[in-house]
Amino acid sequence: MKFDRILVAVDGSENSVAAVTWAADLASSTGAEVIAVHALGLLERIDRELEPSEPHRDEIRQRFETEWCAPLDGVRNRRLLRDGSAVPVLLGVADEEDVDLIVLGSRGLGGYPELLLGSTSTQVAQHSHRPVTIVPTA
Amino acid sequence: MTAAAPVLIGTVADVDRHDTGPGHPERPARLVAVERGFEAVRLAGAAIPLEGRPARFSELTAVHGEAYLEALAQLCEAGGGDIDADTRASAGSWTTALAAAGLGLSAVEALRRGEADAAFVAPRPPGHHATAGRAMGFCLINNVAVTAAALANGGDRVAIIDWDVHHGNGTQDIFWDDPRVLYASTHEWPTYPGTGRATDTGGPGAPDLTVNVPLPAGATGDVARAAVDEVIGPAIEAFAPDWVLVSAGFDAHRDDPLADLAWSAGDYADLTRQVAALAPRPGRLVCFLEGGYDLDALALSVGSTVAALAGVDHRSEAPTSGGPGRDAVASAARIRARIQGGPS
């Protein structure tokens, strides 16, 4: 199988770090480009004290681009911060970029996997028409 | 001075069991702030309390998939949980959401009986981000869409104006290809949920019936008024609706923590007057609370809005002007002119 573009979902959780690391390993052995995507939700714009939003948005961008995506530093990659809810954002970018594979951590932030509504990873796996890899935390 | 016109007002405060957890901005205290805002019309003797009823399951399935609704009810029955990073359901969310979705339906029934000239309802949770099959952005059931669908299924043409600071992706999506419902929105861009480009103008079955006016951070009330005057108003007049419904979020207020527009309570009074003039006659206008997370700004803005519905001048804050965004309005107007002029 040929990999040109690999999308990896990034939310800063421990599982997402495992997914980013796995995607970086795959990219280094295949030469693929990694497209790291973070969906910026409503609550991330504030801290729980309801402080003004812009500095916090900048802080999230900073952490996404430097800390959460750090495992990608050795491979060809792009880091996209998109406004929206995780599932529609990830599926939308996958289509826009025509990626060959979507990589997610097994359980990120949010989601309720025991019920039909599902976590981000199960919903993406259910609705994607592209291959999806779900990476467990080691 | 002419007498104030009667306005129906209703919330789900008495039955609110939708618990979003500590620190969440979409919180029960919002409805207490709304009640403070209602004082503006109570003092004028124009307030008529609305007796709400829960929405029936069959009224929800006009908008949402059965599988989604059953999953949501099941999640609540199991005690609730996080649906996504923003959106949470608790044990009491399902019954609260039914009451919330029923408020607009009750308002329409009361207006049809001639009980008032307009209605302002405050459902919680809010609705305009909820799509046919997905809860998101604090929203579970799309309240305004449930009422619009009921009206459309009864043979009426419905215009929805959404002035919440966030684009109503759920409402747009639900009526994207429906020629009976026009959806028009002003919203900050870029921000959550990432939808609402001016070039998104409706599906093949409803061409030109989606109207988006995305506005830059810092846009003031004069820009919103221009968006209604120059883009949204003409589109609605051409559509000639039987009803006008408003997704009235108040998070475009300059004090709101979730967004960066710069409107004031006085701007909402002016916008309400503009929007009311687009209704075909008295008794055909219902406003639905959506967002608005600074409690004082919410109370002042709701007060200005309901007072304007009653024809009472009550502006606790002066209207704003001078911010950026006139070019965005002009651009949206050009896009619509190009559509209406056909391919060039």
Image: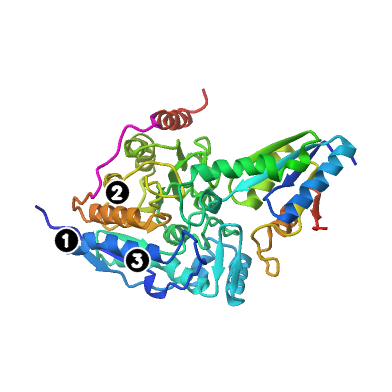
Q: Is residue B71 above or below residue A108?
A: below
Q: In this rendering, would B259 be left or right of A117?
A: left
> Does the segment drawn in magenta span residue B11?
no
Q: Are marks 3 and 2 on the same chain?
A: yes
Give amino acid for label 1. Ala
| Tag 3 residue | B32
Q: Earlier in the sequence, mark 1 or mark 2?
A: 1
| Tag 2 residue | B265
Image mark 1: chain: B
Q: Is residue B288 above or below residue B165?
A: below
Give amino acid for label 3. Val
Image mark 3: chain: B
Which secondary structure lies at badge 3? helix
Circle 2 Cα neighbour tier, 10 Å, few/some/many (<14 / 14–19 / ≥20): many
Q: Residue at x 36, y 33 (%)?
A: B323
Q: Residue at x 39, y 73 (%)?
A: B53
Magenta span covers which residues?
A: B316-326
